[in-house]
Image (tube, rainbow, N blue to C red):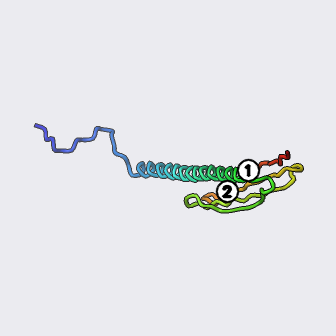
Amino acid sequence: MKNTSAPARAVRGQRGVSLVETMVALSLFAIGAATIGKFITRQTQIASTNNLTSVAQTLAEEELESLRALDYDDIAPGGHSLSKGSVVFTVDTDVDNNTPAPNMKQITVDVSWEDSLGTQHVTVYTIYTAIKR
């Protein structure tokens, strides 16, 4: 009768994993995990900046629409800040009269903010024309 509680014998030629092989495998895993971790961190930062860029673009368009609602002669430079979540956006409007031609105004709206990648800007340009009747 065989004793079933005794450990099974290793097949001749079969051996276990050595400590060196284990350390090499763990080292390769650590290098791969660190590389992927850096990649994911960078992609998360870029995704956040892209989202904030979309918000800034919307703010610039809203500023142009509010200027469009004014009479031509009332369009003037200005600026203000506003918060969206934890981010503060600064909206600066520059107006160049009679540019690029008489009875035209070149309007530049610059929206800036700080994020993990530094100071970011979205700048929108347009030209408004005075309509004389």
Report crowding for label 1: few under 14, some 14 to 19, many 20 or more residues within 10 A (C-alpha): few
Quadrant of the rendered structure where residue 90 is?
A: bottom right
Q: Is residue 104 above or below residue 89?
A: above
Q: Along the horizontal axis of the image, is 93 left or right of 1?
A: right
Q: Nearer the viewer, residue 13 or 63?
A: 63
Q: Along the horizontal axis of the image, is 9 left or right of 77?
A: left
| Residue name at image x 44 percent, y 51 percent | 26
Q: Mark 1 — residue?
A: 68
Between label 1 and label 2, give the one nearer the viewer.
1
Q: Secondary structure at mark 2?
A: strand
**Quarter of the image where the C terminus is located:** top right
Dot 1 amino acid type = Arg
Q: Mark 2 — residue?
A: 120
**Quarter of the image where the N terminus is located:** top left
Q: Secondary structure at mark 1?
A: helix
Dot 2 amino acid type = Gln
Q: Is residue 3 above or below residue 48?
A: above
Residue 83, percent from left and from top: 59, 61
Q: Nearer the viewer, residue 65 or 125?
A: 65
Report crowding for label 2: few under 14, some 14 to 19, many 20 or more residues within 10 A (C-alpha): some
Q: Is residue 68 above or below residue 91?
A: above
Residue 82, percent from left and from top: 62, 61
Residue 32, percent from left and from top: 50, 48
Mark found first going from the N terminus, 1 or 2: 1
